[in-house]
Image (cartoon, helix red, strand yellow):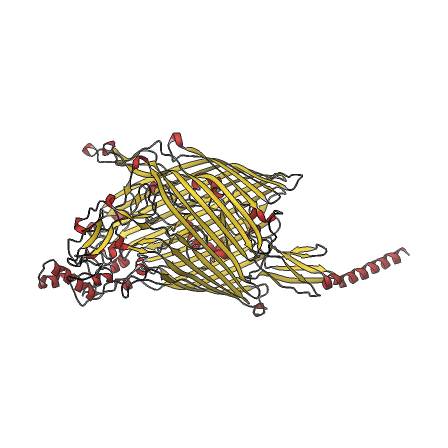
Amino acid sequence: MRGFSLAFLFFYLTVNVQALQAQSISIKGVVIASDDYQPLAGVTVQLKSLGKRTVTDTMGRYSLTVTPTDAAKDVLLFTYVGFSKLETKINNRTNINVQLQRNVDGLQEVVVTNSYSRPKRKEEVVGSIVTLSDKDLQANRPIETLDKLLEGLAAGVQVQPNTELGTPVRINIRGQNSLSSLSLSNDAAQLTTSTQPLFVVDGVPILEPQRGDIPSLITNQQLLNPLASINPDDIESISILKDAAATSIYGNNASNGVIIITTKKGRAGRTKVNFGYNAGQSRSINRIKWLSGPEYYTLLYEMYINEGRSPFDAERLAGSRDINTNWFELTNRVANFQNADFDISGGNENTTFRFSASYLQQQAIQLGNDYNRVNLNLRVDHKLSKRLSATINFAPSFLTKNGLNAYSSVPIAPNVPVFNADGSYYAFSNLGVPNPIAILNQNVNQHEGGALNGNLRLDYKLFDNLTISTSIGTNSSVNKQNVFFSPRNATGSPSNGRAIIYDRQDFSWISFTQVNYVPKFKNQLHKLDMVGGFEARHQSAKLLTGQGTGFTYYRLNELSNAATRNAASSININRTTSFYGQAGYSFADKYFVTLSSRLDAASVFGASVNSTVNSAIGGGWVLSKESFFPKWKAITSARIRASYGTTGNSRIGSYEARGLYTFNNEGYNGNASSALRSAPNPNLGWERSYKTNLGLDITLAKRFTITLDVYQNIVDDAISSINVPAENGFTSVLANIAKMRNRGWDAAINAQILTGAFTWNSTLNVGNNRSTILSVKNDFQRYSSTQAATVLRTGVSTTAIWGFQFAGVDPQTGYEMYVDDGKVVRADSLDRSIANGVYLGDRLPKAQGGFINNFSYKGFTLTVNILYSFGGKFLMDYNLENNGRNLQNSNMSVNLLDRWQRTGDITDMPRLRLIGNPLVPASSKYIFNDDYLKLSNISLAYVLPAQWLKKLKNNRITVFGNVTNIAYIYFDKSPAGRNGIREYKFRFPEAQTWTAGLRWSM
């Protein structure tokens, strides 16, 4: 009986379970973004009435079991941070695929505020921060370093393009916050403080090498871009920190703003694999128009006649009238580009991982210049226990770069041949310049290097609301540059060959230990988030150079084979220790206050002034949550922000405050001796920035967000070199001598213009900045008599152009005329002392920004980037025209064809003279209005339909194409057949690049 009862019970349960199963329905589907059709991982899918929920996996898939009743009547609710929630009736459907639209209510967006605390909702952030996602960065563009990706993407961020591969790009956030000029090249930068923002990658600062850390004996070394070690495809987001409330916690290096880079990490779930490949070609645009061989001969002949030479002598000296060598075409090419990347990620609840590898091969359009890079990146997040977790980042990179300068700064005469009759390279004995084709085939300028970015972080949750964290990270690089000037051409023949080796090793480590405390209040309207810690940083640069001359055979060009050898070396070390803290308080999610403070002690300054404290306070008020706020549908949310605080700048080189000596054998009778190389200044201290910011964030009709910030930055104790009497043993010394002000505004509008099957999202950003030097100690003034045309003078902008007012060419004599003390004088009568110059304009535009548009329709996405700039001035390189001076040695612009030839000619080009046309490089004649629109990038992508990939389960393939640097519209038009700003803007032309590729996700 008992056995029968058990059998009956088993039968009863089985039947009922089967019946219950028959009454359950499984709903499955995929969730993707409506604008780019990318799958969304982590979306919450909830049965609205019962609260039953699940989340999507890494491919955007979900599965939820419901009853038949629920399937008929209930609603599925989809929610995801940064996207609008979506509700849809089930209606007995078993497969429900949805598209979520990005939420334009920016206050709910999660942003990275710094590398010390947790990411926060934007409404909690009181500082001025712009966050760019990987989608915003459009990392599949053919760009070798991530800093070039930022151009036009954020308001108030100015990116100065650099057409040379692998070299640093100049970035200014809200203007120039030190005295060294934005217009100066990397090689010409003054030994003052850095103007560049602080880059922080996964908590580790990436500091650019300082010119002050290069000894005077080491010359011609090229500094590579430290950001080249980061693969743009590995970036998850970039946060740009602008004001004191956002940057103050970084203290001594935050004066120029902070750019935080967060790399991608693995997610729990199915292992995901991505592979991408794209390739393309580049060609030059906006080329300078040079004189042809016959034109050059005509002008040169005329010049010699003007100097009183006989026709016979003029014809002989002018050279060939038949040869027409186009040196630009011979030294340039259609350049190839290819990039491949691979990543694999996944994990479980305890461990997640992501590994990526990429390879970039890029040629410059200038022959002899190319760039190759390999990037690896590994990140592992692991829960060692319930309370202890660890994160490991390990990202090595390797690169090679060739950088021959075959097309020198002074173009070569077009009426000389490339080869002699016997096939050897023609030597320009009368021009004083080498044959560029010989340089390409006989000289060497090669970089080999590598970098390592990495860190280890441990987080221990001592209590539920208190976490102790410690981290140690490194940013290190090596760069070996081999240079050889062959004895077979003019670059090396005077010394029978010259070889140079530069070996630079940069090493830095940073470590911090901190406590995060988030107390719990009974009244949940109160929220408090605090962090405090200690940080130590070490940075060193070791440099070694060897040089040799006199080689018996050009192929045996190792230094050991040189007849004469010498060497120089240097080691530079600086350290910083810091204590920092930050507290954020909020009430009712309406009122927010953040306090930050940081104490820094840096070895780069004098002993009595080597420490400082920087602090900031910021507040935010969400007006739209107040009961008195009008309940207008037009305004979804509104918030105001305000902040004030200080930051510092200590990036001046390791020993600029100390007197440095150089040692040699130039003492009496050849004995060793020492001499003071740089002047000591034990009082050299911090630059201090006092920053004020007022901000407004508004969301309109749930489709438009507007962000507006007004700011002022006062920089006190700005550092520059000043002249001192020579009897001190030196002629200049670095000192805190000036006070300057940056003020302006920046704004951004994000709009969902069209929604539905066809979407159109648009972003317009604009920035305005004006700078003024408020005071200089002892009324000191400094002028640049070179092409830079810069000035340090009270009341003048830090980016001002300083020089002489051009008054045209005298129709009677053909001489250039200038304004001197209110009078028009000939150039040879002009007082050309630079102190006699005048303000000619400002390089900094009055408005600059970008207009980014994204369109999508049925798997297609189209991105169009437009950049613009208005109100700035551009000073061209006078060597391109040079008033005909030195015409006998170099080619020049076709504008010289408009030279003065006879009495009554109206032109801006003087009479051609061998001598007698004085050099006035900083002249209004060479200034153009730098107003332009630039069609910067067009990208088109298409996600292949799933039905095409049925045999490839769980696969996704996207094909795409890109065009960069498509077209410029300059409002200062170039004369027909002549050069203007379009051609003169870049000394070496920009490259227009076309690429195509695919991305395969599995």
Along the line of sight, the residue nearer the viewer: 469 or 799: 799
Picture quarter with the N terminus: bottom right
Q: How many marks?
A: 0
Would residue 162 be seen by someone viewing this image from the given angle? yes
Q: Is residue 332 left or right of residue 634?
A: left
Along the line of sight, the residue nearer the viewer: 634 or 239: 634
Picture quarter with the C terminus: bottom right
Q: Position of residue 488 (x, y in %)?
A: 22, 56
Along the line of sight, the residue nearer the viewer: 955 or 602: 602
Along the line of sight, the residue nearer the viewer: 964 or 950: 964
Q: Position of residue 253 (x, y in %)?
A: 43, 41
Task: Specify the quadrant of the image occupied by residue 32.
Answer: bottom right
Would residue 146 be seen by someone viewing this image from the given angle? no
Task: Specify the quadrant of the image occupied by residue 431.
Answer: bottom left
Q: Position of residue 844 (x, y in %)?
A: 36, 50
Q: Is residue 165 left or right of residue 893?
A: right
Task: Name the residue at 65% across, 39% down.
Answer: 521
Rendered view: 701 above or below 208: below
| Extreme residue toward the top, this view | 608
Q: Position of residue 369 (x, y in %)?
A: 33, 57
